[in-house]
Image (cartoon, rainbow, N blue to C red):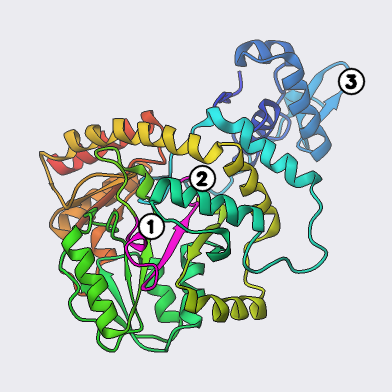
């Protein structure tokens, strides 16, 4: 039988799964020109699907020219001779680069049980009437209202739709803010979010390092300070209440804007989610949120709430540049929020992360030191840099991608591994932990 399988958790139709796998087998040379395909009925029994699923997949591959049907003798891989006995030698094909399983800090768990709402959202997009020209750069009014309601309910941030702006994600929101701020240095946590650092540098501004574990007591000469107070990225620390007040007082004294990246605060499972920093001072804090950690990174959607004094210049800039997320994505997001999909996937993911985090800690704590509390979808471990590099290499050889803590640092002298556990399946996580433990023990 063919080396293929059907994954019931996969959101793709069963026939599409089968066609994709057969096509890949031909491309990689596992199936050669002139190979005879199994009959549809026994293949369907072997895969546990209906015969119609197999026939649909074969019909698609016949139409694409990967397979050919011969009257009275079945279905064959296209391009071979009429007689199987005269089959040509298999062509050598270059190896296909292995796709690594990501154990990073940004790939979330998406529960397939909620896929029906996801599909319904895109069906609604297909029948909705798009705007005739460029749509409102502030974002769809209905989506802004839904986001405002959700921020009040989940983040303690009392805002209305008029103050919410829809963005293309955290980096896009930061880029919009930088366009209306003075061209002065920006203070940023070290270690910290690499995409945000790159965004600030691309704006032509100097980046000033803020030690991630220290109170912020000096922002003189800075236009802004970029922080992740609910779950410091990547160390995992929650900014203490005293440090929050100190940061706000320092920003007020030195005339700096605080940019709060609230990237995964909903995924705490040890305590209730920490309220947003912006809830303490709406005049001093610009709030950035994202759908990447709760729905899908490739959705490229986020939102921001900024002080009132910045709204007009921000809107003028975005109108001028037409810098807004695609209308279809925003329209789909309306359905996903309105019909409970976002709340449902967050609840499911929180349960999964709460179960996985202790497994990761139990496996790795004999060999490395936790850098901070484990929350959300990753944990950070302190190790000598050379050892961390060796462990990462062993993981990559086994098919897993793990990030080095050193890559998040600029002046900070920290090293270790950032181990994500949101993206893999349970089986993949178990195999990855076995690899990591073996490398660490060695």
Against 306, is 58 above or below? above
Q: CA distance from mark 2 to mark 1?
A: 15 Å
**Does residue 398 appear left or right of residue 441 in this picture?**
right
Describe the element under mark 1 as helix, strand or loop: loop
Circle 3 residue: 71
Disc 2 secondary structure class:
loop
Q: Residues within 10 Å of mark 3 (few under 14, many from 20)?
A: few
Give the answer, above or below, for where 417 lies relative to 46.
below
Inspect the magenta stretch and tell me whether residue 424 lies in it.
no
Q: Which residue is located at x 49 percent, y 48 percent? A: 150
Q: Nearer the viewer, mark 3 or mark 2?
A: 2
Task: Please check the rendered image and state whether residue 294 is part of the magenta-colored stretch, yes or no.
Answer: yes
Q: Is residue 166 visible?
A: yes
Residue found 66% across the figure and 58% down from its top: 140
Per the image, the residue denoted by label 2 is: 295
Q: Position of residue 420 (x, y in %)?
A: 33, 45
Whichever of labels 3 and 2 marks the residue nearer the N terminus, that label is 3
Specify the segment rendered in magenta.
276-296
Q: Quadrant of the C terminus?
A: top left
Residue 262: which disc? 1
């Amino acid at each position: 039988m063919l080396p293929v399988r059907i994954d019931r958790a996969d959101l793709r139709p069963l026939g599409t799964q089968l066609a994709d796998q057969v096509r890949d087998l031909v491309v990689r040379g596992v199936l050669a020109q002139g190979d005879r395909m199994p009959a549809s009925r026994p293949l369907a029994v072997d895969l546990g699907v209906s015969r119609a699923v197999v026939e649909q997949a074969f019909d698609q591959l016949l139409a694409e020219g990967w397979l050919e049907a011969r009257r009275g003798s079945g279905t064959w891989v296209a391009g071979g001779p009429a007689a199987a006995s005269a089959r040509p030698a298999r062509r050598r094909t270059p190896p296909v680069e292995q796709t690594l399983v990501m154990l990073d800090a940004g790939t979330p768990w998406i529960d397939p049980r909620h896929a029906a709402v996801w599909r319904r959202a895109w069906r609604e997009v297909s029948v909705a009437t798009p705007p005739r020209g460029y749509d409102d750069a502030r974002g769809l009014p209905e989506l802004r209202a839904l986001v405002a309601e959700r921020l009040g309910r989940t983040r303690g941030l009392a805002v209305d739709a008029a103050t919410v702006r829809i963005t293309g994600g955290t980096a896009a929101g930061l880029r919009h803010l930088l366009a209306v701020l003075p061209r002065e240095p920006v203070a940023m946590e070290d270690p910290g979010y690499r995409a945000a650092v790159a965004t600030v540098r691309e704006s032509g501004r100097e980046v000033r390092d803020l030690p991630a574990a220290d109170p912020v007591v000096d922002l003189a000469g800075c236009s802004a300070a970029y922080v992740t107070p609910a779950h410091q990225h990547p160390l995992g620390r929650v900014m203490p209440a005293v440090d929050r007040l100190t940061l706000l007082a320092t920003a007020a004294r030195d005339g700096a804007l605080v940019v709060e990246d609230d990237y995964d605060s909903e995924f705490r499972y040890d305590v209730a989610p920490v309220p947003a920093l912006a809830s303490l001072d709406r005049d001093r804090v610009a709030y950035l949120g994202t759908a990447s950690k709760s729905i899908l990174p490739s959705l490229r959607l986020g939102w921001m709430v900024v002080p009132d004094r910045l709204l007009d210049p921000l809107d003028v800039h975005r109108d001028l540049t037409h810098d807004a997320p695609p209308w279809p994505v925003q329209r789909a997001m309306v359905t996903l929020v309105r019909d409970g999909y976002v709340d449902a996937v967050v609840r499911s993911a929180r349960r999964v992360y709460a179960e996985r985090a202790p497994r990761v800690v139990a496996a790795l704590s004999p060999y490395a030191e936790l850098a901070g509390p484990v929350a959300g979808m990753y944990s950070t471990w302190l190790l000598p840099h050379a050892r961390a590099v060796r462990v990462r290499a062993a993981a990559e050889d086994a098919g897993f991608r793990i990030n080095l803590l050193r890559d998040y640092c600029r002046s900070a002298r920290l090293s270790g591994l950032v181990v994500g556990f949101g993206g893999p399946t349970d089986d993949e996580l178990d195999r990855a932990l076995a690899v990591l433990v073996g490398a660490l023990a060695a």
